[in-house]
Amino acid sequence: MKTVRKILKWLFGIIILSILTAVILVRFTDGSINTPDKTILGFDEEKGRFLIWEKKTFNLNGIDGPYIIDNQLYEVTKENKLLNKNINRKEKLVVRVNNSDNDLFTFQLKDSITSEPDFYELPEKLIVISDIEGNFDGFSSFLINNGVIDKNFNWTFGNGHLLLNGDFVDRGENVTQVLWLIYKIENQAQKQGGKLHYILGNHEIMNFQGNANYNKKKYKRVAQLISNNDSLRVATKFMYSNKTELGKWLRSKNVIEKIGNYIFVHAGISPEILKYNVSLSDINQIARNNWDKNLYDEEENNKVENFITGKKGVYWYRGLAQDYKYYDKIKENELNEVLKFYQADKIIFGHTVVENITKEFNGKTINTDVKHGQEKNSAKTKGLLIQNGIEYKINGKGTKTKI
Protein backbone atom coordinates (compact mmCIF):
# COMPACT_ATOMS: atom_id res chain seq x y z
CA MET A 1 0.00 0.00 0.00
CA LYS A 2 2.87 2.35 0.84
CA THR A 3 4.39 1.61 -2.57
CA VAL A 4 1.13 2.53 -4.31
CA ARG A 5 0.94 5.80 -2.35
CA LYS A 6 4.54 6.61 -3.27
CA ILE A 7 3.83 5.98 -6.95
CA LEU A 8 0.67 8.13 -6.84
CA LYS A 9 2.56 10.92 -5.03
CA TRP A 10 5.34 10.69 -7.61
CA LEU A 11 2.86 10.84 -10.50
CA PHE A 12 1.01 13.76 -8.89
CA GLY A 13 4.30 15.61 -8.49
CA ILE A 14 5.16 15.07 -12.17
CA ILE A 15 1.72 16.34 -13.22
CA ILE A 16 2.01 19.48 -11.06
CA LEU A 17 5.56 20.12 -12.29
CA SER A 18 4.44 19.70 -15.94
CA ILE A 19 1.56 22.12 -15.43
CA LEU A 20 3.81 24.68 -13.74
CA THR A 21 6.41 24.33 -16.49
CA ALA A 22 3.74 24.85 -19.18
CA VAL A 23 2.34 27.88 -17.35
CA ILE A 24 5.81 29.46 -16.97
CA LEU A 25 6.69 28.82 -20.62
CA VAL A 26 3.40 30.26 -21.83
CA ARG A 27 3.69 33.30 -19.57
CA PHE A 28 7.28 34.25 -20.30
CA THR A 29 7.62 33.21 -23.93
CA ASP A 30 5.45 33.68 -27.01
CA GLY A 31 4.33 30.08 -26.75
CA SER A 32 0.81 28.78 -26.31
CA ILE A 33 -1.01 25.47 -26.54
CA ASN A 34 -3.65 25.60 -29.25
CA THR A 35 -6.15 23.85 -31.44
CA PRO A 36 -7.19 25.68 -34.63
CA ASP A 37 -10.25 27.14 -32.88
CA LYS A 38 -9.28 27.26 -29.19
CA THR A 39 -6.43 28.35 -26.95
CA ILE A 40 -5.94 25.52 -24.46
CA LEU A 41 -3.36 27.50 -22.51
CA GLY A 42 -1.97 30.92 -23.35
CA PHE A 43 -1.35 34.40 -21.98
CA ASP A 44 -2.96 37.67 -23.16
CA GLU A 45 -0.27 40.36 -22.81
CA GLU A 46 -2.72 43.25 -23.32
CA LYS A 47 -5.19 42.12 -20.66
CA GLY A 48 -2.54 40.56 -18.44
CA ARG A 49 -4.33 37.27 -17.90
CA PHE A 50 -4.04 33.59 -18.72
CA LEU A 51 -6.25 32.06 -21.38
CA ILE A 52 -7.52 28.61 -20.50
CA TRP A 53 -9.69 26.66 -22.96
CA GLU A 54 -10.94 29.82 -24.64
CA LYS A 55 -12.33 30.21 -28.11
CA LYS A 56 -9.91 32.06 -30.39
CA THR A 57 -10.97 35.40 -31.76
CA PHE A 58 -9.68 36.91 -34.99
CA ASN A 59 -10.03 40.44 -36.33
CA LEU A 60 -10.24 41.97 -39.76
CA ASN A 61 -7.18 44.04 -40.58
CA GLY A 62 -7.55 46.50 -43.42
CA ILE A 63 -8.37 46.29 -47.10
CA ASP A 64 -9.17 42.80 -48.32
CA GLY A 65 -11.14 41.13 -51.08
CA PRO A 66 -13.22 41.06 -53.05
CA TYR A 67 -14.78 37.69 -52.36
CA ILE A 68 -17.44 36.65 -54.83
CA ILE A 69 -20.19 34.11 -54.34
CA ASP A 70 -22.61 33.95 -57.27
CA ASN A 71 -23.82 37.57 -57.64
CA GLN A 72 -22.71 38.65 -54.18
CA LEU A 73 -19.49 40.60 -53.60
CA TYR A 74 -17.88 40.94 -50.15
CA GLU A 75 -14.97 43.24 -49.39
CA VAL A 76 -13.26 44.63 -46.30
CA THR A 77 -12.65 48.37 -46.05
CA LYS A 78 -9.65 50.07 -44.49
CA GLU A 79 -11.95 50.74 -41.50
CA ASN A 80 -12.30 46.98 -41.06
CA LYS A 81 -15.93 46.83 -42.14
CA LEU A 82 -17.15 43.89 -44.21
CA LEU A 83 -19.39 45.20 -46.99
CA ASN A 84 -21.71 43.08 -49.11
CA LYS A 85 -23.46 44.04 -52.35
CA ASN A 86 -25.10 42.55 -55.42
CA ILE A 87 -23.11 42.75 -58.64
CA ASN A 88 -23.66 42.34 -62.34
CA ARG A 89 -21.22 39.63 -63.38
CA LYS A 90 -20.46 41.53 -66.61
CA GLU A 91 -19.28 44.69 -64.84
CA LYS A 92 -15.68 45.65 -64.09
CA LEU A 93 -14.74 44.95 -60.49
CA VAL A 94 -12.09 46.79 -58.48
CA VAL A 95 -9.29 45.22 -56.46
CA ARG A 96 -7.58 47.45 -53.90
CA VAL A 97 -4.15 46.37 -52.68
CA ASN A 98 -3.15 46.64 -49.03
CA ASN A 99 0.22 48.31 -49.67
CA SER A 100 1.92 51.69 -49.28
CA ASP A 101 1.24 52.64 -52.93
CA ASN A 102 -2.49 51.95 -52.60
CA ASP A 103 -2.36 50.03 -55.88
CA LEU A 104 -5.61 49.07 -57.53
CA PHE A 105 -6.73 47.37 -60.71
CA THR A 106 -9.93 46.19 -62.34
CA PHE A 107 -10.94 42.82 -63.72
CA GLN A 108 -13.95 41.05 -65.16
CA LEU A 109 -15.37 37.70 -64.15
CA LYS A 110 -15.00 34.77 -66.51
CA ASP A 111 -18.00 33.54 -68.49
CA SER A 112 -17.03 29.96 -67.69
CA ILE A 113 -14.33 27.97 -65.90
CA THR A 114 -13.05 24.68 -67.32
CA SER A 115 -10.27 22.28 -66.37
CA GLU A 116 -6.82 22.79 -67.89
CA PRO A 117 -5.06 20.46 -70.36
CA ASP A 118 -2.13 18.36 -69.11
CA PHE A 119 0.23 18.89 -72.07
CA TYR A 120 1.43 21.89 -74.08
CA GLU A 121 3.97 22.66 -76.78
CA LEU A 122 6.97 24.67 -75.58
CA PRO A 123 6.38 28.35 -76.46
CA GLU A 124 9.07 30.73 -77.69
CA LYS A 125 9.24 32.31 -74.23
CA LEU A 126 8.14 30.96 -70.87
CA ILE A 127 8.60 32.56 -67.43
CA VAL A 128 8.36 30.49 -64.25
CA ILE A 129 8.02 31.69 -60.65
CA SER A 130 6.86 29.88 -57.53
CA ASP A 131 6.03 30.26 -53.82
CA ILE A 132 4.85 33.89 -53.81
CA GLU A 133 2.53 33.36 -50.79
CA GLY A 134 0.46 36.55 -50.93
CA ASN A 135 3.43 38.84 -51.70
CA PHE A 136 1.79 41.29 -54.11
CA ASP A 137 4.63 43.85 -54.20
CA GLY A 138 7.36 41.34 -55.00
CA PHE A 139 5.20 39.44 -57.49
CA SER A 140 3.69 42.36 -59.42
CA SER A 141 6.96 44.26 -59.80
CA PHE A 142 8.71 41.07 -60.95
CA LEU A 143 6.08 40.73 -63.68
CA ILE A 144 6.32 44.43 -64.64
CA ASN A 145 10.12 44.52 -64.83
CA ASN A 146 10.24 41.34 -66.92
CA GLY A 147 7.70 42.55 -69.47
CA VAL A 148 4.81 40.29 -68.48
CA ILE A 149 2.46 43.11 -67.43
CA ASP A 150 2.50 46.91 -67.53
CA LYS A 151 2.21 49.37 -64.64
CA ASN A 152 -1.58 49.20 -64.90
CA PHE A 153 -1.40 45.44 -64.33
CA ASN A 154 -2.34 44.46 -67.90
CA TRP A 155 -0.77 41.56 -69.82
CA THR A 156 2.00 42.69 -72.21
CA PHE A 157 3.70 39.32 -72.80
CA GLY A 158 1.94 38.62 -76.11
CA ASN A 159 1.99 34.93 -76.97
CA GLY A 160 4.41 34.16 -74.13
CA HIS A 161 3.55 31.79 -71.31
CA LEU A 162 3.74 32.46 -67.56
CA LEU A 163 3.84 29.45 -65.24
CA LEU A 164 3.11 29.83 -61.52
CA ASN A 165 4.49 26.76 -59.79
CA GLY A 166 2.36 26.64 -56.65
CA ASP A 167 1.98 28.23 -53.20
CA PHE A 168 0.62 31.65 -54.10
CA VAL A 169 -1.64 31.68 -51.01
CA ASP A 170 -1.01 31.78 -47.22
CA ARG A 171 1.46 33.74 -45.07
CA GLY A 172 1.19 37.07 -46.95
CA GLU A 173 -1.00 40.15 -46.49
CA ASN A 174 -2.37 40.33 -50.06
CA VAL A 175 -3.50 36.80 -50.89
CA THR A 176 -6.78 37.76 -52.56
CA GLN A 177 -5.09 40.57 -54.49
CA VAL A 178 -2.43 38.19 -55.81
CA LEU A 179 -5.11 35.70 -56.86
CA TRP A 180 -7.24 38.31 -58.63
CA LEU A 181 -4.20 39.65 -60.47
CA ILE A 182 -3.48 36.14 -61.74
CA TYR A 183 -7.16 35.65 -62.61
CA LYS A 184 -7.18 38.93 -64.56
CA ILE A 185 -4.03 38.44 -66.61
CA GLU A 186 -4.99 34.84 -67.38
CA ASN A 187 -7.97 36.20 -69.33
CA GLN A 188 -5.85 38.82 -71.08
CA ALA A 189 -3.10 36.35 -71.98
CA GLN A 190 -5.59 34.06 -73.69
CA LYS A 191 -6.90 36.92 -75.84
CA GLN A 192 -3.35 37.71 -77.01
CA GLY A 193 -2.45 34.11 -77.84
CA GLY A 194 -0.47 33.66 -74.63
CA LYS A 195 -1.11 31.42 -71.67
CA LEU A 196 -1.00 31.49 -67.89
CA HIS A 197 -0.41 28.15 -66.15
CA TYR A 198 -1.17 27.80 -62.43
CA ILE A 199 0.17 24.61 -60.84
CA LEU A 200 -1.37 23.99 -57.42
CA GLY A 201 0.96 23.62 -54.43
CA ASN A 202 0.53 22.15 -50.99
CA HIS A 203 -0.72 25.45 -49.56
CA GLU A 204 -3.57 25.71 -52.06
CA ILE A 205 -4.43 22.09 -51.27
CA MET A 206 -4.33 22.69 -47.50
CA ASN A 207 -6.88 25.46 -47.89
CA PHE A 208 -9.09 23.15 -49.96
CA GLN A 209 -8.99 20.86 -46.93
CA GLY A 210 -9.80 23.66 -44.46
CA ASN A 211 -6.29 23.93 -43.00
CA ALA A 212 -5.88 27.63 -42.08
CA ASN A 213 -2.69 27.24 -40.04
CA TYR A 214 -0.69 29.50 -42.36
CA ASN A 215 -3.41 32.09 -43.00
CA LYS A 216 -3.12 35.56 -41.52
CA LYS A 217 -5.71 36.16 -38.81
CA LYS A 218 -7.72 38.53 -41.01
CA TYR A 219 -8.36 35.71 -43.50
CA LYS A 220 -9.56 33.46 -40.72
CA ARG A 221 -12.03 36.10 -39.56
CA VAL A 222 -13.37 36.99 -42.99
CA ALA A 223 -13.87 33.28 -43.70
CA GLN A 224 -15.90 32.92 -40.50
CA LEU A 225 -18.03 35.95 -41.35
CA ILE A 226 -18.74 35.10 -44.99
CA SER A 227 -19.36 31.40 -44.36
CA ASN A 228 -21.35 32.21 -41.20
CA ASN A 229 -19.48 29.45 -39.40
CA ASP A 230 -17.05 29.83 -36.47
CA SER A 231 -15.24 26.57 -37.24
CA LEU A 232 -12.02 27.57 -39.00
CA ARG A 233 -11.90 24.28 -40.83
CA VAL A 234 -15.44 24.60 -42.17
CA ALA A 235 -15.06 28.32 -42.92
CA THR A 236 -11.75 27.96 -44.78
CA LYS A 237 -13.05 24.99 -46.75
CA PHE A 238 -16.03 27.06 -47.82
CA MET A 239 -13.85 29.94 -49.05
CA TYR A 240 -11.84 27.56 -51.27
CA SER A 241 -14.81 25.49 -52.44
CA ASN A 242 -16.71 25.50 -55.73
CA LYS A 243 -19.22 27.86 -54.09
CA THR A 244 -16.85 30.82 -54.42
CA GLU A 245 -15.40 32.28 -57.62
CA LEU A 246 -11.78 31.95 -56.52
CA GLY A 247 -12.35 28.45 -55.16
CA LYS A 248 -14.01 27.26 -58.35
CA TRP A 249 -11.24 28.79 -60.46
CA LEU A 250 -8.41 27.30 -58.39
CA ARG A 251 -10.05 23.89 -58.57
CA SER A 252 -9.83 24.01 -62.38
CA LYS A 253 -6.02 23.93 -62.16
CA ASN A 254 -3.57 21.04 -62.41
CA VAL A 255 -0.97 19.73 -59.97
CA ILE A 256 1.40 18.74 -62.76
CA GLU A 257 1.88 19.69 -66.43
CA LYS A 258 4.28 18.90 -69.24
CA ILE A 259 5.32 21.75 -71.56
CA GLY A 260 7.59 20.60 -74.34
CA ASN A 261 10.06 18.24 -72.64
CA TYR A 262 9.78 19.99 -69.25
CA ILE A 263 7.65 18.67 -66.38
CA PHE A 264 6.33 21.32 -64.00
CA VAL A 265 5.26 20.28 -60.52
CA HIS A 266 5.18 22.15 -57.21
CA ALA A 267 7.15 19.80 -54.94
CA GLY A 268 8.57 16.98 -57.04
CA ILE A 269 8.19 13.41 -58.27
CA SER A 270 9.39 10.54 -56.13
CA PRO A 271 10.99 7.57 -57.95
CA GLU A 272 8.53 5.36 -56.08
CA ILE A 273 5.79 6.69 -58.34
CA LEU A 274 6.96 4.32 -61.07
CA LYS A 275 5.54 1.27 -59.30
CA TYR A 276 2.05 2.75 -59.67
CA ASN A 277 2.32 3.21 -63.46
CA VAL A 278 0.34 6.47 -63.49
CA SER A 279 0.39 9.01 -66.32
CA LEU A 280 0.51 12.77 -65.79
CA SER A 281 -3.20 12.88 -66.65
CA ASP A 282 -3.83 10.16 -64.05
CA ILE A 283 -1.98 12.21 -61.44
CA ASN A 284 -4.10 15.29 -62.11
CA GLN A 285 -7.33 13.31 -61.97
CA ILE A 286 -6.37 11.47 -58.77
CA ALA A 287 -5.49 14.81 -57.15
CA ARG A 288 -8.85 16.31 -58.20
CA ASN A 289 -10.72 13.34 -56.79
CA ASN A 290 -8.96 13.56 -53.44
CA TRP A 291 -7.78 17.08 -52.70
CA ASP A 292 -10.50 17.66 -50.12
CA LYS A 293 -9.06 14.76 -48.09
CA ASN A 294 -6.00 14.97 -45.87
CA LEU A 295 -4.33 11.77 -47.08
CA TYR A 296 -1.00 13.08 -45.79
CA ASP A 297 -2.07 12.36 -42.20
CA GLU A 298 -5.13 10.16 -42.62
CA GLU A 299 -4.49 7.50 -45.23
CA GLU A 300 -7.35 5.49 -46.71
CA ASN A 301 -7.42 2.10 -48.42
CA ASN A 302 -6.36 3.18 -51.91
CA LYS A 303 -2.53 2.96 -52.12
CA VAL A 304 -2.28 4.99 -55.35
CA GLU A 305 -4.37 7.87 -53.98
CA ASN A 306 -2.46 7.81 -50.68
CA PHE A 307 0.82 8.02 -52.56
CA ILE A 308 -0.08 10.73 -55.11
CA THR A 309 -1.51 13.06 -52.45
CA GLY A 310 0.52 11.98 -49.42
CA LYS A 311 3.98 12.47 -47.94
CA LYS A 312 5.79 11.49 -51.15
CA GLY A 313 3.19 12.98 -53.47
CA VAL A 314 3.58 15.68 -56.09
CA TYR A 315 2.76 18.62 -53.83
CA TRP A 316 4.71 17.41 -50.78
CA TYR A 317 7.82 15.47 -51.93
CA ARG A 318 11.17 17.21 -51.18
CA GLY A 319 13.48 14.50 -52.45
CA LEU A 320 14.49 16.35 -55.63
CA ALA A 321 16.27 18.88 -53.40
CA GLN A 322 17.29 17.18 -50.15
CA ASP A 323 17.15 14.26 -47.77
CA TYR A 324 13.94 14.42 -45.76
CA LYS A 325 12.65 12.68 -42.66
CA TYR A 326 10.70 10.10 -44.65
CA TYR A 327 13.21 9.42 -47.48
CA ASP A 328 16.63 10.16 -48.96
CA LYS A 329 17.34 12.60 -51.76
CA ILE A 330 16.72 11.11 -55.21
CA LYS A 331 19.73 9.58 -57.00
CA GLU A 332 20.50 10.53 -60.58
CA ASN A 333 19.81 7.05 -61.92
CA GLU A 334 16.39 7.13 -60.21
CA LEU A 335 15.70 10.56 -61.69
CA ASN A 336 16.67 9.26 -65.12
CA GLU A 337 14.10 6.46 -64.78
CA VAL A 338 11.37 8.96 -63.86
CA LEU A 339 12.25 11.20 -66.81
CA LYS A 340 12.36 8.22 -69.16
CA PHE A 341 8.91 7.00 -68.02
CA TYR A 342 7.35 10.43 -68.57
CA GLN A 343 9.35 11.07 -71.76
CA ALA A 344 10.77 14.31 -70.41
CA ASP A 345 14.21 15.90 -70.16
CA LYS A 346 13.82 18.05 -67.04
CA ILE A 347 11.67 18.70 -63.96
CA ILE A 348 11.09 22.25 -62.73
CA PHE A 349 9.76 22.53 -59.17
CA GLY A 350 9.55 24.73 -56.05
CA HIS A 351 8.45 23.94 -52.45
CA THR A 352 11.95 23.53 -50.94
CA VAL A 353 13.67 26.88 -50.39
CA VAL A 354 17.11 27.51 -51.88
CA GLU A 355 19.23 30.68 -52.06
CA ASN A 356 19.12 30.96 -55.83
CA ILE A 357 17.51 29.39 -58.90
CA THR A 358 19.29 26.05 -58.71
CA LYS A 359 20.15 23.43 -61.33
CA GLU A 360 21.14 19.93 -60.28
CA PHE A 361 21.73 16.51 -61.78
CA ASN A 362 23.46 17.94 -64.88
CA GLY A 363 20.64 20.39 -65.43
CA LYS A 364 17.85 17.81 -65.24
CA THR A 365 16.17 19.56 -62.28
CA ILE A 366 15.65 23.28 -61.62
CA ASN A 367 14.42 24.54 -58.25
CA THR A 368 12.61 27.92 -58.41
CA ASP A 369 11.69 28.35 -54.71
CA VAL A 370 13.72 31.24 -53.32
CA LYS A 371 13.22 33.79 -50.53
CA HIS A 372 11.57 36.47 -52.64
CA GLY A 373 11.94 40.12 -51.70
CA GLN A 374 8.86 41.49 -49.95
CA GLU A 375 9.32 44.96 -51.44
CA LYS A 376 8.90 46.09 -55.05
CA ASN A 377 11.75 45.90 -57.54
CA SER A 378 13.85 43.56 -55.44
CA ALA A 379 16.73 41.55 -56.88
CA LYS A 380 15.83 38.91 -54.29
CA THR A 381 12.65 38.06 -56.19
CA LYS A 382 13.70 35.48 -58.76
CA GLY A 383 12.29 33.31 -61.49
CA LEU A 384 13.23 31.34 -64.56
CA LEU A 385 12.99 32.32 -68.23
CA ILE A 386 13.10 29.72 -70.99
CA GLN A 387 13.50 31.55 -74.29
CA ASN A 388 14.15 29.78 -77.59
CA GLY A 389 15.16 26.73 -75.58
CA ILE A 390 17.78 28.60 -73.48
CA GLU A 391 17.38 28.90 -69.70
CA TYR A 392 17.97 32.17 -67.86
CA LYS A 393 17.68 33.31 -64.25
CA ILE A 394 15.68 36.56 -64.00
CA ASN A 395 14.97 38.79 -61.01
CA GLY A 396 12.64 41.51 -59.77
CA LYS A 397 14.75 44.23 -61.40
CA GLY A 398 14.47 42.63 -64.83
CA THR A 399 18.07 41.35 -64.92
CA LYS A 400 18.58 38.25 -67.07
CA THR A 401 21.48 35.83 -66.60
CA LYS A 402 22.07 32.59 -68.50
CA ILE A 403 22.29 29.53 -66.22
Image: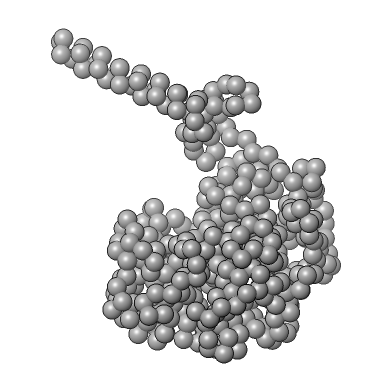
Taking depth in this image into account, of 200 and 229 the one nearest to the observer is: 200
Identify the residue at horizontal 38%, vertical 69% (top origin): 320
What is the count of numbered marks? 0
On the image, the x and y values in percent for residue 14 come to 30, 21
On the image, the x and y values in percent for residue 201 come to 51, 64
Quadrant in which the N terminus appears: top left
On the image, the x and y values in percent for residue 180 come to 70, 64
Left or right side of 330 for 34: right
Evaluate whether residue 95 shows in this view: yes
Left or right side of 400 for 148: right
Task: Relative to 82, say whether 392 is above or below.
Answer: below
Task: Relative to 150, say whether 22 is above or below.
Answer: above
| Colour style of the rendered protein structure | one colour
Taking depth in this image into account, of 291 and 345 the one nearest to the observer is: 345
Identify the residue at horizontal 49%, vertical 38% (top origin): 35
Left or right side of 199 for 270: left
Identify the residue at horizontal 28%, vertical 78% (top origin): 333
Identify the residue at horizontal 61%, vertical 66% (top origin): 379
Please, which residue is most extreme toward the top here? Answer: 2
Task: Relative to 176, say whether 50 is above or below.
Answer: above
On the image, the x and y values in percent for residue 235 come to 61, 48
Taking depth in this image into account, of 217 and 243 the one nearest to the observer is: 217
